Image (cartoon, grey):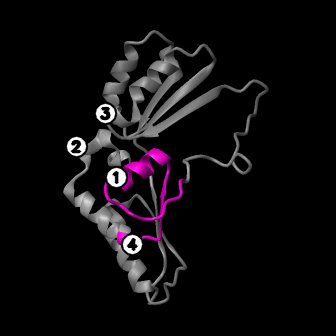
Amino acid sequence: RQAQDFAPDIIHGNVIYPIGQLASFLSKSLQVPLVFTEHWSVYMAINQALYTPEMHEVTLETSKQMTYLLPVSADLGEAIENKGVDVKQQVIFNSVNTEYFFPKFESKRPQFTFLHISNFDQRAKNTEGIIQAFSKLNIEANLVIAGDGDLERLKNFSSTLDFHKDRIQFIGALD
């Protein structure tokens, strides 16, 4: 019964593959616009080996139903366009509106924390480069690394650098 009463004004998906087919079906069935925000760097030329024919097929079929594609960067939008996706785009950057979201500091001299969340794909995310740059900072700060991928590789890499290891925390994948 709840499915019969389902009447959205728009369908907004995040990351075209693998849910693009379902989103397209719902968009057609309910006759509402479909937009996708795309974050995944699998479309970038550097990740060509990870981009499968199935991903390509789902992406192209989904794009035929899309009203808008909202990539998180102009580079990503261009890379998706280079895959044959011909749909209107508007870049919506991965950012935080600091008018609404801001850190609450409880001390007069807060310690700054950098947070990096990714899939640890070195070619696309350069997590080792982030750790190396952090190790050279001459400020009181911490680095938290979260996400999925080879966490041990990153821990081993950080152990080769000369800095206070207690300033970095590896927490891995989060629910």
Camera-side residue: 166 or 16?
16
Query: Dots 3 and 2: beta carbons under 8 Å?
Result: no
Image point 40% across, 19% down: which residue?
Answer: 158
Percent across and percent down for residue 85 are 36, 61
Q: State how far apart marks 4 and 3 are (Cα).
A: 32 Å
Q: Is residue 60 left or right of residue 71?
A: left
Camera-nearest residue between 19 and 80: 80
Give the vertical position of 33 relative to 152 (above or below): below
What percent of the width, then of the height, locates residue 70? 49, 58
Residue identified by numbered label 4? 23
Residue sitting at x 49%, y 60%: 89
Which residue is drawn at the image coordinates 26% and 59% (left, top)? 56
User: Which mark is on residue 82?
Assistant: 1
**Residue in front for this viewpoint, 138 or 140:** 138
**Mark nearer the viewer, 1 or 2:** 1
Mark 4: secondary structure: helix
**Are circles 1 and 2 on residues that touch, CB within 8 Å?**
no
- Does the rendering let one see residue 67? yes
Task: Please tell me the numbered disc located at residue 74.
Answer: none
Badge 1, how many Cα within 10 Å: few under 14, some, many 20+? few
Q: In terms of sequence position, does the residue under pointer 1 or pointer 2 come before the other? A: 2
Identify the residue shown where x is 22% and y is 60%: 54
Mark 3 residue element? loop
**Residue placed under numbered mark 3 in the picture:** 150
Q: Which residue is mark 2?
A: 49
Which region is colored magenta?
64-91
The answer for how far apart the CA atoms under marks 3 and 2 are is: 18 Å
